[in-house]
Amino acid sequence: MDIIWNVQTPDHISDLYTQCLLKASDRKLAWEHWRGKTKGSKIRDWHPGMTLNDRPQDCNLYETYFPMIVNKANDCRKIFTCRINKKIPPLYTWLSLPRLDFLPSHVNDIIAGDGGLLCVNGGEKSLIKYSCTHQSSCDSKCEERCCNGPLKYFNEQSMILVCNPLTKEVKYLPKQSTYCINNGLVARMIFTSHCTQPPLDHDRSSKCHRSAYKLIIVGNHEQINEKRRYVCNEMVLLTYDSKTDEWLLGTSIHNARLVLHVKSDIAIVGECLFIGGEILTGYHRKCSDESGSKIWENKLFRVNIYEGKWNVIDFCIEDRNGETVEMQAPIIVQCKPDGEVYAVTRKKLKPSTIHIYQVMLAGENPTGVMKTLSLMPEDVFVALFEEKTSLKSYECSAGLHYIAFLASFPSQSVVAVFDLYTSAWSVSKRPIDHGCLAQFSLARCEWTPNFISFSKVSRNEF
């Protein structure tokens, strides 16, 4: 049996294991056999944390992991996670998940994920001459911008791929040439159709068996001339459909940009997407031209995903006296699609805490009210940034019912977590391989291990 097991493909292994789960009496035997066959499942340095629950109403076969951090300092690109659920205290222990060492170098920014799949961004591309890929003849605007305009050189879009870290299968998304967006993207993966769902799988892991998805990506449009590369004042939204393997929609808003001091995120309610950013309102001019520094104002952006229409919403925080407080541009996070929308920010000058607000909505429309949920306690802030007041950049992600924070400086691996159910704050311990060469990044999704999701759809889509 051992020899047969070790030569099975991930497809066959997942099929065999699923068949064992048809009978409750076989679950424990299947799990014991699975646990001892890491060679057959081709997993290295991984503790799956799968759960066996004796209560028939709780048939969650896989643990959902959040938050996850990636060590980007070496080619191994290890992923670590804290085991979090309602029964175990937050950040109870660190676990080692599958590595990203099967991906190209520098592709290590997990920007989205669902159903056992991860969307990863990164990599560096060389300068190439821009080539318009429109199938029809270019209109005057496109011709001026793309073909005959002064920006005849375009920096290639960084790699965007979807992978299953268990089976190590990878799908590289096609290049998008209408706009040029590079690293620092934000994204959300939305599954759009279902396969036949397996038995005993009725909650989170049911997402793992959906066969098609859309990937919504927001980034800053980049342009480059023969002398230098720069980010222009334009924020773009792109939609990718796995059914057709094409980019379906590209829309943008001028004089706007994503938050630069932190990695942002996306919230989706109905057909609308919410994201935090800034609007260019003017210049500090020393002369008549626009050579002075730019003036940016904090805003929330609401975008209809299917129509491509942008709405700009004021983001203004007042103190108890009604005075406007100078805050950084908000990070918008959301634990699940169509769930509550949260805005995370801090003061521009000598911040000693991080503020979490709930963006109050009427349907898909913001009411303009920001409900205060919590302020990061002083001891948590100091543990995260290693100083009482700090403007160091940080990363923020939401999943399950938690909001996680990670400071973005070398060797920092302390993760702070806010529990939305209990309104309690927790601070993690450092991963076991913490060292001076470590450089951690926070994944902006939760992850449920699954062998079937990628292998089952890869024949047609990937």
Image (cartoon, rainbow, N blue to C red):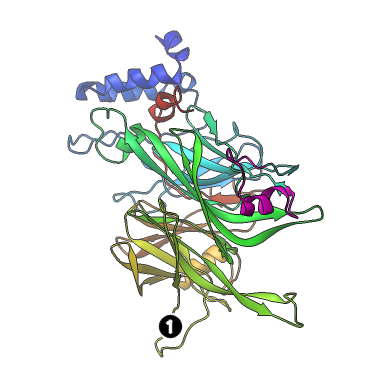
Quarter of the view holding residue 175: top right
Q: Residue 12: image x %, image y %?
A: 40, 16
Residue furthest to the right in view is: 227
Residue, disc 1:
318
Range of residues picked out in magenta: 132-153
Q: Residue 406: image x %, image y %?
A: 53, 58
Quarter of the view holding residue 404: bottom left
Q: Residue 105: image x %, image y %?
A: 66, 38
123 drawn magenta = no
Residue 182 in sight from this viewpoint: no
Above or below — where is 382 with respect to 43?
below
Residue at the location (49% across, 28% down)? 462
Determine whether the residue tagged by mark 1 lies in a helix, strand or loop.
Answer: loop
- Between 218 and 113, which is closer to the camera in this rendering? 218
Residue at the location (39% across, 87% down)? 320
Left or right of 278 on screen, residue 359: left
Circle 1: residue type: Glu
Residue 348 in sight from this viewpoint: yes
